[in-house]
Amino acid sequence: MMRIRTETPYEVQSEQYREEAEAYIAHERLVEQARLAHKEHLQWDLLAWFSRLENRSFEMLHAVERRIHGLIMWVLHWFVRPQIPPNGGTAL
């Protein structure tokens, strides 16, 4: 004679709770993976932003350096004239 196993309402309910808990844990793992991926993406965005800022600041520094060099050359050209020696530079 074969016995038929019948589940009690408690066993059915505990099985449902177990499935819900597994689904919740799986969902939390996905949420954590998404959170970590978003955090990594933000870190890469910050790194790219700082890299662009560094490049921009280097370009600005180079532009200032060129302007200062141009100003110095202009001052030297207009205010520091070479002295012309007597006899038009033919004297030794």
Image (spheres, rainbow, N blue to C red):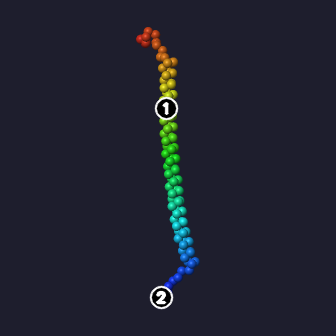
Q: Is residue 50 above or below residue 32?
A: above
Which circle's residue, 2 or 1, is located before the other in the chain? Answer: 2
Q: Which residue lies furthest to the top in this view?
A: 87
Q: How crowded is mark 2: few (under 14 residues within 10 Å), some or many (20 or more)?
A: few
Which numbered mark, 2 or 1, is in the foreground of this view? Answer: 2
Secondary structure beneath dot 2 equals loop
Q: Which residue lies furthest to the bottom in this view?
A: 1
Is the residue 73 above or below the residue 37 in the image?
Answer: above
Spot occupied by residue 61 in the image (x, y as percentages of width and height): 51, 34
Give amino acid for label 1: Ala
Residue 10 image-quadrant placement? bottom right
Q: Where is residue 40 in the image (x, y as percent from the top left)?
A: 51, 53
What's the residue at 51%, 57% (across, down)? 34
Q: How crowded is mark 1: few (under 14 residues within 10 Å), some or many (20 or more)?
A: few
> Quarter of the image containing the C terminus?
top left
Tell which of 11 and 69 is nearer to you.
Answer: 11
- The answer to whether residue 12 is above or below residue 83 is below
**Residue 25 % position (x, y):** 54, 65
Q: Which of 61 and 48 is in front in this view?
A: 48
Task: Identify the disc placed on residue 11.
Answer: none
Q: Which residue is drawn at 49% across and 32% down?
A: 63
Q: Which secondary structure lies at badge 1?
A: helix
Q: Residue lying furthest right in this view? A: 10
Q: Distance between the residues labelled 2 and 1?
A: 93 Å
* 1 vs 47, nearest the viewer: 1
What amino acid type is highlighted by mark number 2? Met
| Residue that carries the numbered disc 1 in the rendered image | 63
- Which residue, given by chain and number where applicable, does mark 2 sit on? 2
Residue occupying image coordinates x 54% and y 69%: 20
